[in-house]
Amino acid sequence: MTSSLRLTFDREFEEARQNLYQLADMVGAAIDQSLKALVDRDLKLAEEIIGNDEEINKLRFKIEEACLALIATQQPAASDLREIFAIIHLVVEMERMGDYAAGIAKTTIMMKEEPLLKTFKKIPRMGEISREMLADSIQAFKQHNADWAREIAARDNEIDDLYQSIFHKLIKIMAKEPEMITRCTYLMWCAHNLERIADRVTNIAEQIIFMTTGDMRELQG
Amino acid sequence: MNDQPPVFQIRDLDFYYGPSLALNQINMDIQKSKVTALIGPSGCGKSTFLRCLNRMNDTIPGTRVVGEILLEGKDIYAADVDLPHLRQRVGMVYQKPNPFPQSIYDNVAFGPRVVGIANKRTELEQIIEQSLRQASLWDEVKDDLNDNALGLSLGQQQRLCIARLLAVRPDVILMDEPASALDPIATLHIEELIAQLKELYTIVIVTHNMQQAGRVSDYTGLFWLGELVEFSPTNRMFTRPENQISEDYITGRMG
């Protein structure tokens, strides 16, 4: 049954959804740009990413406030309530993903003119997968598709494998060439941030499953 | 809060039933094209306050008003105020639908005929259709305009009363628990109607139903023992009220 008698609620609810999609776009762009800044050592772009993070934070709080007001004034129930509950979680996850992208940008600035390492190639790959996971999760949210959400969460294994591979490679380099320790540590931070971004997408997938099925459980990824 | 000047400015309003002080130092601005909800426990003064806005309390012997209520800058309690004109501009919808025992058509035509808004039959019919459309009732009654209004459901009767009021082109609509006699679906019809009407009219609604205040209003005022303890945007009132009485009332710990 369509909620033709809740037009005000429907309108405000849709506005919250649209803001969520905008937040996802902003966070996705921040991840893309952070990788570009890292690969190209583009310090100006890195500064921009750090500056834009404030906009991501603002939009997160705006959406949270709107959801809070919806709950307080419109008394959503059942699937509406679960979706609003999910949105509140999603915006927190996305805002943290934005922080990780800003973290990569900050690390890029710290690395300045340092030469790149061979191991570096797998880091952009981690970024690509994380980025795809985020984009897919938003589509799964839009379609209320719990099965797709489970598939997305499963991709976290690819990220974890890449991270482990990078981690061990960097450890080896540091053991062999102590003068590389600083550089390798910076790269490890970047890889760690990307690994955490993918973890956050897994959390988003959990919320999509809850929203769609009412089933609240942790996914292993 | 709003760029437009307020429709009503209430300044230091006291209201007495005989010697008894029912409203104490009420100050409030009511914004144009917004819904203002008045909430509070029974006997807190919210309906008394609502009736002050179109001087319906004048009909009660021994009542007295101190302070000012300005409607677009003019004191509605000034000696030269034309009461029928005031009540045309500031109409009221009551708790129980009160259609006249006449046809649907005549119910809506009543006001324009008395006030003399429509001089020709075609003009009157236009007003009737427009009023019924604005009240979201036209589609349900357009083929039965000559039927007796008392044959309508309670929810339809209430929307007819709103249409009857709209027919005299008010600026402000006062609603005193307009949905308390209605079932949940008819209540939602009224609430959506309120959301539509606020584009054209300023609405002040008294409701016992706190959730309804949350759903329909832009601003909420909480009355308590004759005082306005808090008046703020509804989202704020329902998420972070500033007054402890508001907090306790809204969370159901008092009242």
Image: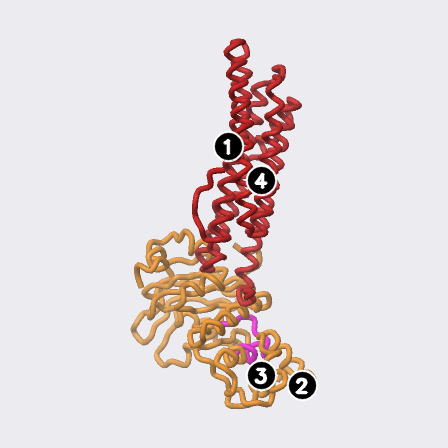
Chain colours: A red, B orange
Q: Are marks 3 and 2 in contact (CB under 8 Å)?
A: no
Circle 2 packing at 10 Å, graded few (<14), some (14-19), many (20+), is few
Query: Quarter of the image holding residue B213?
Result: bottom left
- Distance Cα–Cα, label 4 vs label 2: 65 Å
Dots 4 and 2: beta carbons under 8 Å?
A: no
Under mark 4, the amino acid is: Leu
Of circles 3 and 4, which is in front? Answer: 4
Query: SS of the residue at dot 3?
Result: helix
- Checking the image for residue B6, the label placed there is none
Q: Are marks 3 and 4 on the same chain?
A: no
- Magenta range is B161-174
Tell me whether circle 4 and circle 1 mark residues in contact (CB < 8 Å).
no
Q: CA distance from mark 3 to mark 2?
A: 15 Å
Measured as percent of width and height from the top left, residue A208 is found at 51, 48
Q: Which residue is mark 2?
A: B119
Work out whether residue B176 can be spotted.
Answer: no
User: Magenta segment: does it hold B214?
Assistant: no
Question: Which residue is found at the position 59% from the left and 23% from the top?
Answer: A108
Mark 1 belongs to which subunit?
A
The percent position of residue A121, horizontal first and vertical second, equals 63, 23
For disc 3, the marked residue is B108
Residue B233: x and y, percent?
A: 47, 56
Q: CA distance from mark 4 to mark 1?
A: 12 Å
- For residue B27, what is the image quadrant? bottom left
